[in-house]
């Protein structure tokens, strides 16, 4: 099976964008039929072999662990010595990411614009948002953009403004108008969400394909679309986000796009990573950031993302995920069973040549290292790193 990372896997499963219908009523009926018969309306099936499913991410809180993956399959356990229990999930869409808030509350996101929440530690999930609602938010966002750009363009025409700036405004207005005209009733269903992060119980961000970004300030009771308010005018896919100890939020994605906010999304600045490939993850330690992605590319910033330097990892495997083994060593995993340890000075490739299955995520929990991938999950002791690498 060819190598693929969890974001590409999600994108490959996302529906193709349909042609715009001349009949709005016909398009709406078609979208309704799709929703009524698709994975948004069908609960995930219980499966005795669920632990062998494709899992895309793992998260933990106070020993409690959750794995999320294809067909709406989510499994949870109280600690590393407990058995995995399959959760009750109201959808069969692929779940791409999960984020714990406390030992009872967690959020998960996935295909078809799905946002899920649990309040019992992961055993039962409720759908809080999906692509149908996302379509409505996209429409509101585009209408607001058109109104703002129209006012700015009209003002610019009567004041002394640079001709290039005027042309840029006109291009932005034309682009927003075209997107609104081309918006279909099931446009939101075609957007996969790739990551979720809550900095408090109330404030959360969700990111995904085509520059999608959603924000909540009331604990997920309502969501706003803010993809047009961030420095990503091309609408590149947004793949991963994290925060530091000061609650600065960092996001990376396709074509080397990166951004951060220090005031809970009120203002954003670009991260000048100087890379044109996709970045799949970002890790933080103090004021130091590490971002990684395609073909073993990895970058470091030691000043909260203002300046970046490239690191020579010595590998060409895609890097999909990372976690800290301790306060000095970062374990990176990825395509072809990649396992790479970085100690701040050099990289140690501990991959086993006999293990070539892609690893989609990793989480270090005390002495255990949990990995997920295309054949389920695995758990190993950190001490195994000293004995030829993880199995």
Image (cartoon, rainbow, N blue to C red):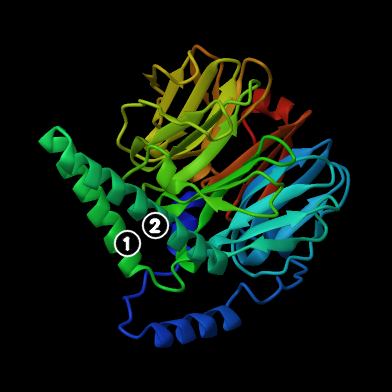
Image quarter of residue 84: bottom right
Q: Is residue 180 left or right of residue 287?
A: left
Q: Residue at x 78, y 68 (%)?
A: 48
- Mark 1 and 2 residues: CB-CB less than 8 Å, in contact? yes
Let me know if residue 322 appears in the view: no
Q: Nearer the viewer, mark 1 or mark 2?
A: 2
Residue 369's spot in the image, x, y percent? 71, 35
Residue 174's spot in the image, x, y percent? 23, 56
The residue at which mark 2 appears reads as 142
Helix, strand or loop at label 2? It is: helix
Q: Which mark is residue 179?
A: 1
Rate crowding at label 2 as few (under 14), some (14 to 19) or many (20 or more) other CA atoms within 10 Å: many
On screen, residue 349 above or below 102:
above
Residue 341's spot in the image, x, y percent? 56, 24
Helix, strand or loop at label 1? It is: helix
Q: Residue at x 34, y 64 (%)?
A: 180
* Farthest-out residue, left: 163
* Farthest-out residue, front: 158
Image quarter of residue 152: top left
On screen, residue 53 above or below 280:
below
Q: Indicate the quadrant containing the C terminus: top left, top right, bottom left or bottom right.
A: top right
Disc 1/disc 2 C-alpha distance (Å): 7 Å
Rate crowding at label 1 as few (under 14), some (14 to 19) or many (20 or more) other CA atoms within 10 Å: some
Q: Nearer the viewer, residue 143 or 222?
A: 143
Let me know if residue 92 appears in the view: yes
Residue 227's spot in the image, x, y percent? 45, 47
On screen, residue 360 above or below 35:
above
**Mark 1 or mark 2: whose residue is earlier in sequence:** 2
Q: Residue at x 41, y 31 (%)?
A: 315
Image quarter of residue 199: top right
């Amino acid at each position: 099976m060819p190598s693929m990372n969890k974001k590409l896997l999600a994108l490959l499963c996302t529906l193709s964008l349909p042609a715009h219908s001349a009949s709005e009523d016909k398009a709406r009926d078609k979208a309704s039929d799709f929703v009524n018969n698709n994975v948004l309306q069908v609960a995930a099936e219980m499966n005795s072999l669920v632990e062998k499913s494709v899992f895309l991410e793992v998260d933990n809180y106070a020993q409690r662990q959750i794995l999320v993956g294809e067909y709406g399959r989510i499994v949870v356990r109280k600690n590393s010595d407990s058995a995995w229990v399959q959760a009750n999930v109201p959808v069969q869409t692929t779940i791409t990411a999960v984020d714990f808030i406390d030992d009872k509350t967690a959020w998960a996101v996935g295909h078809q614009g799905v946002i899920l929440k649990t309040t019992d530690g992961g055993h039962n999930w409720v759908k809080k948002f999906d692509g149908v609602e996302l379509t409505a938010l996209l429409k509101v966002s585009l209408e607001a953009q058109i109104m703002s750009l129209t006012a700015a363009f009209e003002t610019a025409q009567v004041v002394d403004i640079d001709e290039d700036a005027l042309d840029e405004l006109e291009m932005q207005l034309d682009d927003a108008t075209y997107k609104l005209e081309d918006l279909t009733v099931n446009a939101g269903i075609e957007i996969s969400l790739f990551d979720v992060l809550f900095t408090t119980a109330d404030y959360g961000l969700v990111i995904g394909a085509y520059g999608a970004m959603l924000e909540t300030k009331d604990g997920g009771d309502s969501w706003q679309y803010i993809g047009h308010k961030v420095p990503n005018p091309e609408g590149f896919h947004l793949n991963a986000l994290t925060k530091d100890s000061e609650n600065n939020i960092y996001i990376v994605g396709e074509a080397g796009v990166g951004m951060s906010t220090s005031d809970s999304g009120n203002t954003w600045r670009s991260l000048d990573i100087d890379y044109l490939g996709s970045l799949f993850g970002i890790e933080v330690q103090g004021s130091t950031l590490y971002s990684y992605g395609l073909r073993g590319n990895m970058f470091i910033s030691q000043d909260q993302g203002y300046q970046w330097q490239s690191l020579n990892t010595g590998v060409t495997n895609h890097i999909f995920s990372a976690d800290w083994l301790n306060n000095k060593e970062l374990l990176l995993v990825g395509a072809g069973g990649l396992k790479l340890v970085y100690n701040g000075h050099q990289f140690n490739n501990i991959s086993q040549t006999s293990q070539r299955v892609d690893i989609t995520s990793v989480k270090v929990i005390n002495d255990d290292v949990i990995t997920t991938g295309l054949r389920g999950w695995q758990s190993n002791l950190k001490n195994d790193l000293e004995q030829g690498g993880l199995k």
